[in-house]
Image (cartoon, helix red, strand yellow):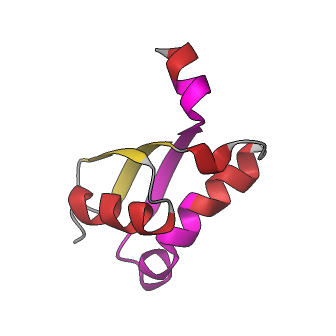
Amino acid sequence: MISPDQVESMIKSQLPDAQVQVLTNDGEHYEVVVVSSAFEGKGLVQQHQLVYRAIQQEMLTGAIHAMAVKTYTPKAWQDAS
């Protein structure tokens, strides 16, 4: 089982400036919200690929079974708040 803090650390290793929120009920299924300037000028698929790249190994081994991802640029996050 991977803790939300571990998932957050993995994402921040790929996206150092990211603000990350991680939720899980069972330690296998996660919901994450990631805000990063690295998403500027990228489409939604490209943004999600950056996040999934950070947790790719854990997905391959089954340590993370599923992850719902929401990504925002800092401006989009500010506008959504």
Q: Nearer the viewer, residue 25 or 46?
A: 46
> Quarter of the image containing the N terminus?
bottom left
What x and y, as percent, mark residue 46?
A: 73, 55
For residue 19, above or below residue 58:
above
- Image quadrant of residue 53? bottom right
State left or right for residue 60 relative to residue 13: right
The residue stretch that appears in magenta: 51-77
Q: Residue at x 43, y 85 (%)?
A: 61
Q: Residue at x 60, y 35 (%)?
A: 73
Q: Residue at x 66, y 51 (%)?
A: 47
Q: Nearer the viewer, residue 18 or 50?
A: 18
Q: Nearer the viewer, residue 38 or 72?
A: 38
What x and y, as percent, mark residue 18?
A: 45, 49
Q: Residue at x 59, y 44 (%)?
A: 37
For residue 22, above or below residue 10:
above
State left or right for residue 55 relative to residue 48: left
What x and y, as percent, mark residue 69?
A: 52, 46
